[in-house]
Image: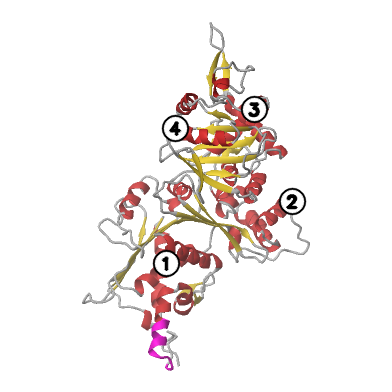
Amino acid sequence: MTDAGTGITEGMTEEEIIKHVKKCRRDLAFFAPRFLKVQTTGGDMVPFTLNRPQRLLLHIFDEIRKKRLLRVVILKGRRMGVSTLISAWFYQRTALYPNRYAMQVTHEPQASEFIFKMVKRYYDFCPAAFRPAVRANNARLMEFNNKEGTGLNSAFRVATAGKDDLGSGQLIHFLHLSELAKYPPENTDTLLTSVLQTIPKKSNTAIIFESTAKGIGGEFHDRFWNAKYRVWIKRLSKDGNPIMEETVNPLADELNDYTSVFLPWFVFEDNRMVPPQGFVRTRDEAELAKRYGIDDEQLYWRRYTISNECRGSLETFQQEHPATPEEAFLGTGRPVFDNTKVSLLRDHAPPPIARYEILGGNVIAAAQGRFKVWKEPQPGHAYIIAADVAEGLLKGDASAAVVIDHRSGEQVAEWHGKCDPDEYAQFLLAIGKRYNNALIAPERNNHGLTVVTHLFSAKYPYLYCEMVPDPPGKPRKRYGWQTSSATRPLIIDTLIKEEREGTHGLKSAELFGEMLSFKIQDNGKYEADANRHDDLVIAAAIAKHLRQVTPLPAMRKAKPRDALHAPARRKGGNWA
């Protein structure tokens, strides 16, 4: 005999009962279908059985909590039940544990009302043994306590974005900011500043940002791309299981503890329809099936949704039901590269054979090193190193160096990270020497001049230089590459041509990722979308262009005095 639906039977020992109760408190996938009810679109009340995106999120949460605080930014498609999952998880944590406080913040009053009704439904349908005493139960607050104040002393609150000092003076253990991309932009910053101060930096806490995308820029867009850790579903395996990729964002603030989580539309098992007889894949659909491991039922659901729910607009579908994060954040610019090809290149990019850090001029193996190598230097080969130079601040762009084989054009290595310009010059010296005294071409724009000066002072043997007009006198040498409004389209055109013809020889998944957000913006400039980076794109473009205009040198033992003070051998650009 079962006691009021709790799963506790007369034959259970005390030890078995304790174990059962602990599992209910700890395991939401066990607790939810037994004790919580949800309302279907048809109006029926049914046990809350987790769908695949919900199970994936719980697994990701558990894995993160083993390593660090649970701080996540979730980008997902429509109707996956993420808010439903989080409200159930928060309910479990507050209704079954003492002294715990949860808050869900939505973008509009109707959404707040919907979520709070869902939470009240959890409580109303939960067996009495797992339903604590309630002292407050109004439109926005459910306080689990008794009149004497000796109950659980936990609470679940739902609020709406719009109040600048939201959460001020409160203690919150579990915070969910739902549909952040739709918060009122005029007070989002002050709202977050207020509410985020209420969460202790303790292991039993959670901060969850979650939203569908809403264009380029904004709080959600920036937090997603700036997160240090990334857990993204990339595709489905042959047996239909999600393939997850975990990476570290090399450009993130060192103290950033957030994980960006991406759930594509095809991971949701409900996103499928039986296609009509005679269904034939289009060329694009065949490519999608290959890229993401999806089947005809998923493809037909996609085709039907585009036609009936997105007014025939692929761009609208991609924003509402993205397959990649880049698809979700629609910009106004025109892609410079073929995004279909580049997406495939990124998905199948080979991992580096080695990674290193450069310390005191020494190249030292490091699992997460910023210097990635696909091919070690080969005797008799000449190399080109093009270097994009950034200011070195914690916020903003990073410096990047791309190393290519001069003869073949193949990418063999890259360095990408944030550091001061003088330190970056030391890294370039070490890389240049390692790759047979490669031709180094650092940008001389702005802080690049510091890098050029350090390389010159170090008597590096092969530093790129140009002969520039200097009226009324003779042309003079200028060391380093000058990126300008005139040269930027020139170098990008070289990279576009090689990408189109498949002769680029590039290897870096990170570089391909930058190419996806590199666009001709509305102002006519070739640059990355807001809060995205193009450091590697520019470095690769410089390297590719210089390979075309610079003669392949005769390899010999380098002598510093040969290089820095000899006249350039051809007008335009050359080995110094």
Give yes or no for residue 403 being in the magenta stretch.
Answer: no
Mark earlier in primary sequence (4, 2): 2
The stretch of residues the image draws in magenta is: 10-20
Question: Quadrant where the N terminus lies?
Answer: bottom left
Which numbered mark, 4 or 3, is in the foreground of this view? 3
Q: Give the residue at mark 3.
A: 556
Q: Is residue 459 visible?
A: yes
Q: Image point 66% across, 36% down: which residue?
A: 379
Q: Is residue 484 visible?
A: no
Cα–Cα gap, marks 1 and 2: 41 Å
The answer to whether 377 is drawn above or below residue 542 in the figure is: below
Q: Position of residue 62 (x, y in %)?
A: 46, 66
Q: Given contact means CB atoms under 8 Å apart, are the residues at marks 1 and 3 in contact?
A: no
Mark earlier in primary sequence (1, 4): 1
Cα–Cα gap, marks 3 and 2: 51 Å
Q: Position of residue 377 (x, y in %)?
A: 62, 39
Q: Given contact means CB atoms under 8 Å apart, are the residues at marks 1 and 2 in contact?
A: no
Say how the picture is coloured.
secondary structure
Q: Give the residue at mark 2.
A: 283
Amino acid under label 4?
Pro
Give yes or no for residue 16 being in the magenta stretch.
Answer: yes
Q: Quadrant of residue 323?
A: bottom right
Cα–Cα gap, marks 1 and 3: 68 Å
Question: Quadrant where the C terminus lies?
Answer: top right
Q: Give the residue at mark 1.
A: 87
Which numbered mark, 1 or 3, is in the foreground of this view? 3
